[in-house]
Amino acid sequence: MAYEELSKLTEEIQKLNKHLDERVKTLEERQSKTETKISQGGPIAAEARQELEKINAKISAEIKEYKKLVLEQKEQMLAAQRPPVPGGYPGSAAGSYKPPATKAIEKWFRKGGDITALNMEERRLIDFNHMDYDMYTPEQKVMVSAAADLGGFFAGTDFSDKFIQKLFLISPLRAYADTQTIGGEKLIIPSEGATDTNIFWSDEQTGYQASPDPNLGMVEIFARELNGYIKISRQNLEDSVFDVEAYLLKRLTRQFAQKEGVAFISGNGIARPEGILTVAAITSPVAGGMNQFVGTDTTTHKLLPSDLISLMHVGKSGYRATGTWLMSNSTIGICRLFADTTTRPIWTMFGDVFSETLFGRPIVEMPDMPNQAGTFPAFTAGQFPVIFGDIGQGYQIVDRVGLTFQTLKELYAIQNQVAFLARQRVGGKVILPEAISVLKMG
């Protein structure tokens, strides 16, 4: 009977969904070609909106009823396996059925707790040492806690399959920089120097003039090593109620992603990648530094919309069309408050995926960028809170050895521990400073 009701509810939900799709399609056909389709977030007339909301409400009610019926059916199936109680319970009349496990327990009591008095079929039902756990449902398995001297069942506490984990904030610069896998210790990239060749105008009486030789150089990017290991006792691995090994490897993976993200932003280049902000500290572009704009608020050191506009134009215009904003979460919060003279927000969102843009260019949150060192929303002089530029052309990442794991079971066996070794070889460097501009607070 319950199965038939579930089938009817399923059919009804499918019919309502089909009816909803047909109504949306009909309304979209009535729209002009210039209007955004309803299914893509376009405007809906008031009468049509009420009609669609009624259909959605009915679908939600049917789904709620479906879930309720599934739960009741599941409870009845479990109730049918429990020992009958006085007065009966849904799914089994009082005294009409006695589960085999109940019979085995009663026989064990009658024999004075002598487990050897039971045959093997009966012991499989109540003896932890002979129990076949595959025959039980997940709800029954969770009630089995441990094997005491005599074994037994008890109503244990609920154990959630949810695991509480803290959030890792990772700077996703890798997704925007140029990445290359190498087969040696370093990558060498030919680069133009400060001196370029030249040509000259001449008239009919002037001969050719010698052009100067261009100054060329090489940019070297070394693969640096990032590693670590964790030791854990064998007892923890054996007795834990969740997969400790998978958890440790997952956390190590996140740690590697976080550490390389920090290095790509602020690494000093010594035994680690060189970060963008390290190059930003070089004030002269001729000496290898990148474009800089100094904030105009030299008193309170607050971020101004005019500073960001100037930052967009301090570099060469060819990089502006492919530029990306990089800043921390708190700096993004300040930018969200920017407004024009009519109080309209400068920050806009557009497109089906709601890409966040500022002055028409996308914004990417980099948790490792500097936050306000002064009283919010003020910075301190010398901070670099904002980066703008073509990161793909300006920053190069090299991968020598990807993230690898190794399990060491023998090294710490005398301590009854297992070690998990992890390592990675990666490098990074600013290879074209002129493609990136930074805002320095004055």
Image (cartoon, rainbow, N blue to C red):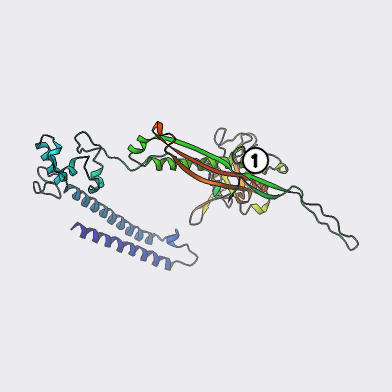
The three-letter amino acid code for the residue at tag 1 is: Ala
Identify the element where label 1 is drawn. Answer: helix
- Counting labels gives 1
**Residue 172: image location, x then y, percent:** 53, 46
At 47% from the left edge and 67% from the top edge, which residue is drawn? 32
* Dot 1 crowding, Cα within 10 Å, few <14, some 14–19, many 20+: many
Q: Position of residue 173 (x, y in %)?
A: 56, 46
- The residue located at (20%, 56%) in the rendering is 2
Q: Nearer the viewer, residue 348 or 133?
A: 133
Residue 335: quarter of image:
top right
Residue 368 seen from this side? no
Q: Nearer the viewer, residue 344 or 195?
A: 195
Q: Position of residue 233 (x, y in %)?
A: 38, 34
In the displayed orientation, state which residue is furthest to the right: 205
Position of residue 347 in the picture relative to residue 2 (left or right): right
Left or right: 349 as drawn, with respect to 278: left
Write the residue at 21% across / 60% down: 4
On-image quarter of the N terminus? bottom left
Where is 19 relative to 164, above or below? below
| Quadrant assignment for the C terminus | top right
Q: Quadrant of residue 106?
A: top left
Q: Which residue is mark 1?
A: 280
The answer to whether residue 222 shows anywhere in this view is yes
- Identified at 26% across, 46% down, the residue is 138
Q: Is residue 128 above or below residue 30?
A: above
Relative side of 69 to 275, left or right = left
The spot of residue 163 in percent (x, y) is 37, 41
